[in-house]
Image (cartoon, helix red, strand yellow):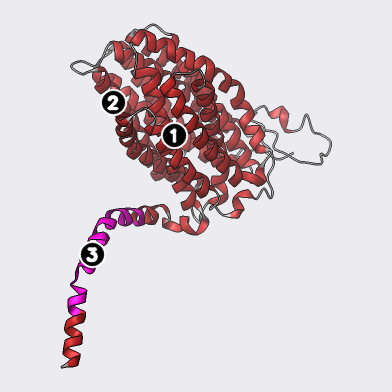
Amino acid sequence: MAAARTEFKGGSRGRGPGSRFRAVGRALRLPVTGTARGIRKATHAHGAGESGLGKLIELHGVNGAGDVMITVALASTVFFSVPTDEARGRVALYLAITMAPFTLLAPVIGPLLDRLPHGRRAAMAVAMGARALLALVLSGAVVSGSIGMYPAALGVLVASKAYGVVRSAVVPRLLPPGFSLVKANSRVTLCGLLATGVAAPVAAGLQQVGPRWPLYGAFVIFIAGTVLSFTLPPKVDSARGEDRALLAADERHLHGPHRRPVKRPGLRTVGPAVTHALAANAAIRCLTGFLIFFLAFLLRVHPLSGQSAAVSLGIVGVAAGAGNALGTAVGAWLRSRAPEVIIVTVVAVVLGAAVTAAVFFSTVLVACLAAVAGFAQALAKLSLDALIQRDVPEQVRTSAFARSETLLQVSWVLGGAVGIVLPLSGTLGLSVAAAIIAAGWLTTVRGLIDSARRGGRARPRVA
């Protein structure tokens, strides 16, 4: 009888209010914990968890989410909050104060970080922490409209690109067994795109609350990124066997400058395949920078047929993002098969899309060009990664990644500068876009095809 009473009491206790509250709490936590477990399972799959690549993938997602928070806050302040004519002047001022100095600083970022191979985790943490503090500075500047917004934005830009350079140098150190560099980079990039897509509407919602709130969100995200940077494996900071790379394809650099033995051997050339691929990628980056700024103003004045300016910009932005994600997925599937042919093909495709959009300017063709440009940028960059993995010796591979990434960022800035100064004529602007990509394709197609025919056998040597 006592046992029965005890059992009854225990059963009553299990069905009491406390038990129900715990059950409700578990039910409320399930979407969050279940999502977190799903993300962790995806990022750590196929050995990425053991090698440390999974943590880098998650860190890059945090980076993308924080960057889009700041982008939404600045775009709303500089671009959307004023009439088109005034917005163009403010964006031009933004370019002059932030992008122009960045064009001078960007070539220094790669070589400077290349001299700090033992502190990569600290460098990534500093890049995250700096953006967290600058987000707080910007939160005051966007409300007051003070000139301090511009140097703070420049600091965010420099820190973001410094993170990108270090991240490119870190990936080869974290490859799981059997992983190609293209597949690893595609996973990292795809996670960043997904995080950006999730964070963008959240940032837009915070913007409706107040102009400061997306920047407060960025502060929290970048603080988390600062902590996550130090969770990367210690081998990230190892520089064993590394040296600096010179981005040159001239065969005379193989032996000319250093015929005598040197104390610190280094790569004298990364080979013609890599430099031609880098030039083609620079043309695509220049095109995407141009399209972002040119179409932003063109669609404010001349929206897509039957759509408002905001919807028009949204359509083009979604098309570009979808194309970029598709290119990343296709790159992971293709792995490193004939990267020279892939680059030649995608640049030819985006050239055809630009010419078609310039001749038959229409709503559908503008969206298609944005999607094709995003696709080409993602796939061409992954193919460049494959060429660096194939043709650049391991001891200078991280240096080659750092320097190539810096050059691509400078190309994007230059393309944006061209887009901001052109008259708002769709046919004229897309003709310039076609000319940009044509210059890159015509100057690299022969070298890339010759390299593909040789099968990458003619590889550079270390002095």
Q: Name the residue carrying label 3.
A: 23
Q: Nearer the viewer, residue 381 or 138?
A: 138
Q: Nearer the viewer, residue 157 or 18?
A: 18
Could you tell me residue 281's position as x and y percent? 49, 28
Question: In terms of secondary structure, where does tag 3 sit?
Answer: helix
Rendering quarter of residue 303: top left
The boundaries of the magenta stretch are 11-37
Question: In terms of secondary structure, where does tag 1 sit?
Answer: helix
Disc 1 or 3, which lies upstream in sequence?
3
State if disc 3 and disc 1 touch (CB < 8 Å): no
Rendering quarter of residue 242: top right
Could you tell me residue 163's position as x and y percent? 54, 37
Disc 3 or 2, which lies upstream in sequence?
3
Q: Please indicate, yes or no, whether residue 439 appears anywhere in the rendered image.
A: no
Q: Is residue 1 above or below residue 122?
A: below
Disc 2 or 1, which lies upstream in sequence?
1
Residues at marks 3 and 2, CA–CA distance in whole angstroms: 41 Å
**Prevailing secondary structure class for the magenta stretch in the rendered image:** helix
Could you tell me residue 221's position as x and y percent? 44, 42
The quadrant of the picture occupied by the C terminus is top right
Q: Residue at x 83, y 39 (%)?
A: 261
Residues at marks 2 and 1, CA–CA distance in whole angstroms: 18 Å
**Does residue 28 show up magenta in the picture?**
yes
Q: Residue at x 58, y 20 (%)?
A: 101
Tell me, for residue 67, which label it has, or none: 1
**Does residue 342 show up magenta in the picture?**
no
State if disc 1 and disc 2 touch (CB < 8 Å): no
Tell me, for residue 314, which label it has, or none: 2
